[in-house]
Structures are given as structure tokens and as C-alpha cells.
Image: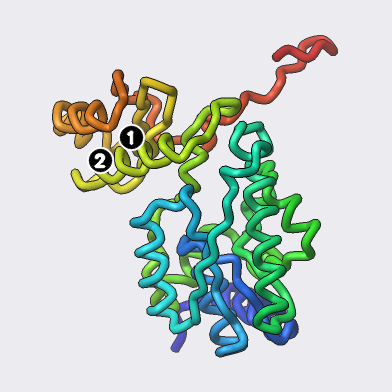
Amino acid sequence: MSLVPDPLLAKQATAEALIASLGSVAVAYSGGADSALVSALAHRALGPCAIAVIDASPSLPEDELRDARAVAAAIGIELVEVATDELADERYASNPADRCYFCKDALFTALEAFLVTRHLAAIVDGYNADDAAEVLHGRRAAAERAVRSPLYEAGLSKAEVRALSRALGLPTADKPAAACLASRFPTGMRVTLEGLRQVELAERAIKARGIRELRVRHHGDTARIEVATSELPLVLEHRQAIAQELRALGFRYVTLDLDGYRRGSTAAPAPVRLDGITLP
């Protein structure tokens, strides 16, 4: 007897049927919970006619790439690695508010070329129903390329993605949310290869202390550490070692954000309207 509620099974069936109707797909894959579930459903629906494609660019941590490979192997889906050069695009490297658009545009351009090479019919991604509540610039790039979103179209929320992943035995069911390393830079601060590497190594050093959910925000000579509030005591326990390791990476100041981890804390604030006047 299935432990998965019937409404969730119905959504799973809807997502799988949508994927099957496409005939063959390339999954825009990152190794996170959403794209891993889409990859698993695509593999179930299409077998070898579904291929996961990951962008092994400098903004993807090496640890994340390693884990993504392991997840794809566990699913049984073929994984292909491509390398976009988004840092060569000034529109991306200058880090405007819509930086993600240029990143996704580069990825989907590469995926469209991959479709032709491997004779595949469509691109699918891991956009879910909860994502619709946020302003995601990468979504515009997906719409321009006619990318399909099985989770969103089946009405699967993030919580349902995790529940279904757990039922299917996916190792990503409880994986913390991740984002590309460029998201650690405040809007308008240039994204560089050196800076990406600093952030990657800083986060690796902190995770080595058993901390799971964190971001190291890059503010030039200052590293601002965000962790889940429940893990603040653990950071403080290792604060001297962490500070020493991050200073060795080139940061002059190492700070701990007492507000804890929150998505988008480096994004430019939205304008405030007061009596018809827009304030910066």
C-alpha cells in the first residue's frame, strides 16, 4: 500500500504524463531537489530518451557538481556536463539585478544546441509551483526558449517535491536549498573568478564544521556569514578557526549575520513608494 497521498500521486502522474508526451527531453539539471525529481520522473517516463544536463561553470561549487553526479547515477539517468562562459558576458559579470536572466539564457542556448546534437525534442526544468511567488529573472529566459516545467504545470509545491522525492528514495529529499555562487555578491558588485573561488572555499571550510545551511556573502574585503539560526551556536563555537581560515582566503574582516540565513539578502532592495513618490 502506497504511503503517498492520492492527490500527490495524481500530481506525479500528471508530471510524468507531460514529460512522456514530449517524446524526449534534456533536463536542466543542478542536482538540487527540484531538478533531481524532474530527472527521476523523466527517467521513469522516457528511459534513455531523457538526459540530464548540468552547467559545470565556475559559479557551481565543485562539491555540488560531485554530489550532482552521484544523484544522477543513483537515478540512473545519463548526465552530460556542459560549460557556459557566463563570466565572459559583461551583462552577467557586472552583476545587475537581472543577472540570472543572462545566466539562464546562456544555459538554455547551450541546451538548445544539445537538443539538435542528440535529437531531443524539448527542454524541461525544475521550476515548481512555489517559485511563482518570487520574481525570478531566469524564468523569463525559460519562457523565451519554450522550456517546459513539469513540477509547476502539475501544481507541485516545494514541500510536495520533497515528499515525493522521499517516497521515491531520492537522496535530495532533504537537501538544503542551494544557489549559484554568484548569488553571494551584492547587486552591482562585479562577479569574478577569484571571488567565486573565495566564496566556494570559505563555505567549504564552514561546512566542514558540520554546518549544513549557509551562505558566505562577499562584500569585498568582508565575508558576511549567514547560517540557519539554529546553527549560530555551532559557528560561534568554531569562530576563531573559521575566522582564521577565511582571512587566509583573502578576507580582511569576517562577520556573522545575527539575522541568520535568508534568501536574496544581497539583492538590490525593491523601491519603496510613499505618497506616489518612488524612493530608492
User: Which residue is drawn at the image coordinates 55% and 30% (left, top)?
Assistant: 190
- From what the image shows, is residue 250 above or below residue 70? above
Q: Position of residue 232 (x, y in %)?
A: 26, 32
Residue type marked 1: Thr
Depth check: give the residue in front, 179 or 156: 179
Q: Quadrant of residue 198?
A: top left
The residue indicated by pointer 1 is 229
Q: Quadrant of residue 109?
A: bottom right
User: Which residue is drawn at the image coordinates 30% and 27% (left, top)?
Assistant: 250
Which structural element holds mark 2?
helix
The residue indicated by pointer 2 is 206
Q: Tell whether label 1 touches label 2 (CB within 8 Å).
A: no
Q: Quadrant of residue 220?
A: top left
**Label 2 to label 1, Cα distance in Å?**
15 Å
Q: Position of residue 23 (x, y in %)?
A: 71, 86
Residue type marked 2: Ile
In what quadrant of the picture does the N terminus appear?
A: bottom left
Asked whether, in this view, residue 1 is left or right of residue 63, the answer is right
Res. 154 in view: no
User: Which residue is drawn at the image coordinates 42% and 29% (left, top)?
Assistant: 218
- From what the image shows, is residue 131 above or below residue 271? below
Closest to the camera, between mark 2 and mark 1, is 2
